[in-house]
Image: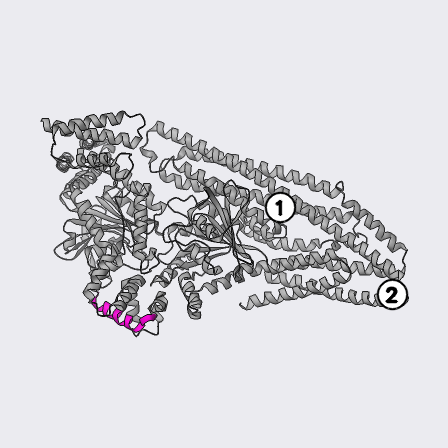
Amino acid sequence: MNATGETVASVGNDLGTVLAGLTAIAATLGRDDAVQQLAGLQAQVSRATTYVVVLGEFKQGKSSLLNALVDAPLCPVDDDVATCATTIVRHADTLEASVLVSGAEQSQPIPPTAARAAALAGHHQGATVERVEFGVPSSLTAAGITLVDTPGVGGLRSGHTLAAASFLPFADAVLFVSDATAEFSASELEWFRTAVERCGIVVPVLTKVDLVPAWRTVLELDTGHLATIGSTSSVIACSAATYEFGSRVADDDLVASSNVPMLRALLAKRVADPARQRAQIRAAVKARAVARSLMEQVRNEFALAAEPDGEQANRLHDEQRSLQALRSAGSKWAQVLNDTAGDIANASSFQFRAAMRTLGQSLDARIETMQSADDWDGFSSAVQHEMADAVAAVFAEVDRRFDELRHRLYEIVGDDGVGVDGGRSGSVVDVSAFFATTALDAAEVGRKGSAMQAVRSAQSGLMMFGFLGQLLPAAGAALLLSSPITIALGGYFAGKALLDVRKRALSTRRTQLKQGVRKVIDDAQFELSNRVAELTRTSTRSLRDEINEAITLAIQTRTEALEQAKQHVAADTTARAARGDELRRIAEQLKALDAALGASVPAVSRVTS
Amino acid sequence: MTLADVTRSLAIEAAAQLAGIPAATDAEAVVARLDGPLRIAVAGRVKAGKSTLLNALIRDRVAATDAGECTKLITSYCSGVSYEVRGVLADGTSIEVDADRTEAGLIVRLPADPAGSIRRLEVRWPSSSLDRVTFIDTPGLVSINTENSALTESALIPGSGDQTDADAVLYLMRHVHQRDVSFLEAFMDRTVTLGTPLNAIGLLSRADEIGAGRLDAMETAARIAARYRGEPTMRQLVADVIPTAALLAETAATGADADLELLRRAADEMGDGRRHELVSVDRFRTSDLVSLSTGERDHLLARFGLFGVRVCVERFAVEPTVSTARVVDQLYNLSGVGEVRRRISTHLEPQAAVLKARTALASLRRIGHEVAASSASSSLGERLLAEVERVETGALDFTRLRVLHLVTSGLVTITPAEAEQVRTVATSVESGDRGTTLSGIDQWRARLESPILDAPTAELCQLVLRLFEHLTWASAG
C-alpha cells in the first residue's frame, strides 16, 4: 500500500472505532434498531463497490490480465477462441460462479469450471450466455473493486462493440488493454477517446511485454498517440505471463517486474480509495444521525427523571403518536412517494420514446443517403452510440428525479412533527451533507456535461448506492439485446458494394434496413420500459424502507427514553443518582463521538475534492 | 487463343486506338504488365509482419523493419541485374533514388524536393526469388496514419487509383479481424469479374506470438489456421490459411551462424534454469546466468524474437553439439515460409496467365471508364468497355476458376464423386470422350432441375454445363 492508501485506511479505522463506540452505547441504551443500523454502516465502510471495466480489441490479453489481477484462473484464456460473454468478477469468501443466459430472469449458480467453459463457448445448456459472474476471494475484490471483462472489439463474429460500450458509463474506471506486438491502431485510439469521454478514469495498459523485445518503443509510440488526442495518461507495461510464472515459482522479483502488483495498487489508489472515501462520508453522515438520536434520548431521559409526569413526558407521548401516524399508508409522505414515482415512470418512458422517435427519423434519413457497404460501419456504430446515449439519459433522469423526491420526503416528515421545535430536522438525517456530496459530483457533471457523466457521478452519489446492482444489468441487457439484431442488419450489406447494385435492389435493401432499424428500436423500447418500470419500483421500495426506518428511529428514541425513565423513577435514590451519573457519562461520550464524526466528514471531503 | 492472348491483343489494340491521348500510356503499361512477372502484393494490418515476410521470401534483408510502423510507401520488388531504387512520380515517370544497404535493410533517402510527388518505389534487386514474381510491399491497413491506409487500398484495389494492381495477394493477419474481412471482400468484389479466392492466400502471421511464444506455439497456430480454413467466411475469401513466423525464416535466410553460436553458449550457461531465465524478454536481458553482453542479447532478441531464442536454446540444451546448419534448417521449416513459397509455386504461378489477364481486364475497364468520361473520346471508351465485357463473359478460364472456387470453398452441396468430376472437367483443356461429356450434360441438367437447389449449387450446375457443352463442341469441331 502506498502513502495515500495508509491515510485512507487510518481514516477508515477511526470511523470504525467511532462506530464501535456508538454501537456499545446503543446497546447500553437498549437500542437494538440503532445497533443494527450501525452494523450496516460498518459493512458499507469496509467495502464500497466500484466497477472497473477491462476494454480492448479482441486477443489483446484482457482475460489473462484480469486473471493475474485477481490471482485466479477465472476468465478463459485461449490462443484461438476469444471470450464472447461479458464476465463480471466480484468479491466472495470462496470461489463461486453463476451464469445468466438470455431469456432467463436470474443468474443460476454453476461450478466455476463450467462457467469458464460457458464464457468461452458463448452458450450454456443450449442457451446463449449473456453474462458470467464469478465471486472470488482476492485483495483487489476485497477492496471493493468489481472487474468487468468485456468481449473484445472487432472479432470475426462480434457484435460485441456494443456490449463493451454499454458498460462504460457505469464504470468507475476503464483498463484499456492493448498488446505490445503493435502500436495503437486508429480504431483503438478511437476507442480510447470514447472511453475517456464516457468514463473519465482510463488507464492504458500495454500487455504481453514479456514476448516483445521492442515493447519499450511501442510504449513510447502509444504514449505519443495518446498525446495527440490530448491524453497525458502514462501507459503501464504489464506481463500476466511473467506474473503467473513468478507466482508459481515464488520469485518475488519476477512478480514485481510483471507490474501486476503495481497496477493493483494503482486501481486501489485511483478507484477503490476514492470510492471508500465517499462511502465513509455517507457512513459518517448517517452515524451522526444515530449519535444525535441517542443523545436526544439521553436528554429526554434526564428531563423525565427530573419531572416524571410533566410537560416533557406529554410532549414525547404526543410526538410518538404523530410519528406512529406517519407510518400509516395514508400519511402524506407515502402518498407523495406513490404519486411522484408513478410520474417518474411515465415521464421517463415518454422521454425515451421521444428520443427513439427522433433517432428513428434521423436514421431513416441516413439510410437514404447510404451508398456503399463502408457506410454500414459508421451507421451501425451510430445506432449503437445514440441508443446508448438515450438509455443513459433516461437512467440519469430517473436518478435525478428520485433524488429530488427523497429531499422532498424528508422535508415532509420533518414538518410532520419530528422534533421541529428544536430545529432538529437533522435528527432524522443530516440533509445538508447530502447536498455537499451531490454538489461535488454536480461540478463534475458541469465540466464534462454529458448525460453519461451524469449517470456515472449519480451512481457514486448517495442516491445510487443501492441502485447500481440494477443499473448495470439493466443497461447491459437493454443494449446487449440489440447487438444480435444489429449483426442481422449488417447482413443486408455484407460484402456487397451498394454502388454496384441496381437502383431497384438498392431501394429494396434500404427499405429492409429501415424495417430492421424499426425493429431494433421497438425491441429496445420494450426492453427499456420494462427496465425503467423495474427500476422505479425498486427505487420506490427502497426509498419507502429508508423513510420508514428513519421514522422508526425517531419513535424508538422517544419510546426508549420513556421506558428508561419509568424504570428509574421506580428505583431508589441511590440507583437514580447512579443512573444520572451514567447518563452524564454517556452524554459526554456521545458528544465526543459526534464531534469526531463531524470532524471526519469535512476531512474526508477534502481528500475527495 | 487463350484468355491471356485475347487480353493481350485487346490491350495492344486499345493502346493503338487511344494513341494521342494520355490513356494510351496506361494501356501500354497494361501490355507490359501482361508480359512481366506475376505481381503478388503483401498486405495486412499495421505490424502484421509484411516486410519481415518479404525479406524471408526474397531471402535477403531488403525491406526495413522496425517496432513502429515503417513502410510508408508502396514498394515493389522486382528482379534486376544490380541494386537500384527508383521513385515513381505521379505522371508515371520515375527518378533514381539514393539508398543504402544496411544490416537493418534498405534505407531509402527520398530527395527533399519532389519527395511529395513520389507515389511509390520500385526496387530492383538481384535475387533468383524474384525471377517469376514481383512482390509489392504495402503500408498497413488501419494505420494511425490514415493516409498510409488509403494508399494501400488504392494500390491493391484496381479501379480505385494507382496502377499498381496486384494479380494476387498474400494477406497477413494475426487474428481475423472484421477489418481484414472487409478488405478481402473489397479485394474480391472489385478485382474480379467472378469473385474467387484463388488469388488470395491468408497467412496467420507472427504465429509464434499467437501461442504466447511457447515452444509449441507453431502447433497451436497450425490448429488455429485449420479452424480459419474451415470458417465459411474465410473459405470464400482466401484459398488457404498458412501459419507463419516469418522472423525465423528471415533470420535463417540471412546468415545466423554466429548468432546461433551465441545461443549455444547461452543454453549451456542457463542449463536447467532456461525456462526461468526466458520467461520474458526483460528477464533474458538481465539474466545473471548468461555471460552475453547487453548488446548481444538485444541483437539476439531482435533477430529471433523470444520464441526463436526459446526454440534454439531448447534445441542446444537437448543436443549441445548439433550443427548450426541443422538449426537453421529447422528454423526455416518451423517458420512456415517454405510452405508459402510452395503455395506460390503450386497455386499462383501455374495460374499466372489467367490471374494477370484478370488484372489487365480490370485495368482496361478502368481506362475505358476514364476515357468514356471525357466527351471528346467517349465513343472510344464505350467501345473499349464493350470489348472488355465481351472478353470477360466469353472467357472459359474464368468459368473454370469460378467452378473450382465454388467447389473448394464448400459453398455448394455436392457429393465427393461429383466434386471430383467437376474438378476434372474444370482442369481439362483437351476435349474428352464424347460419350462421357454428353452423359455429363444430361446428369447436370437433371441436377439443375431439382427443386431444392440452393443458389450457389444452381450456379455451379450452370457453369459445369457450360464447360461440358464447350467440350462437346470442341470434340465435334
Q: Earlier in the sequence, mark 2 or mark 1?
A: 1
Residue A465 placed where, x, y %? 61, 52
Give the chain of mark 2: A
Report the span colored magenta: B256-272
- Quarter of the image containing the N terminus of chain B? top left
Residue A104 pos. (x, y %): 53, 41
Question: At label 1, which amino acid type do we have?
Answer: Arg
Same chain assignment for discs 2 and 1 = yes
Horizontal side of residue B433 vs B453, given as left or right: left
The amino acid type, in three-letter code, at marker 2 is: Arg
Which residue lies under the disc numbered 1? A400
**Magenta stretch: includes residue A324:** no
Q: Chain of mark 1?
A: A
Tag 1, which secondary structure? Answer: helix
Mark 2, secondary structure of its residue: helix
Residue B463 % position (x, y):
22, 31
Using a 10 Å C-alpha cutoff, classify the residue at mark 2 as few (fewer than 14 neighbours), some (14 to 19) or many (20 or more).
Answer: some
Residue A367: percent from the left, percent from the top? 42, 34
Which secondary structure class fits the magenta region best?
helix
Residue A29 at least partly seen: yes
Q: Is residue B266 magenta?
A: yes
Q: Which mark is residue A230?
A: none
Q: Nearer the viewer, residue A195 or A162?
A: A162
Image vertical order of residue B6 relative to residue A296, above or below: above
Q: Nearer the viewer, residue A498 or A213?
A: A213
- Which numbered mark, 2 or 1, is in the foreground of this view? 2
Instruction: Locate the C terminus of chain B and report the quarter of the image it occupies.
Output: top left
Q: Residue at x 30, y 49 (%)?
A: B225
Residue under label 2 = A576
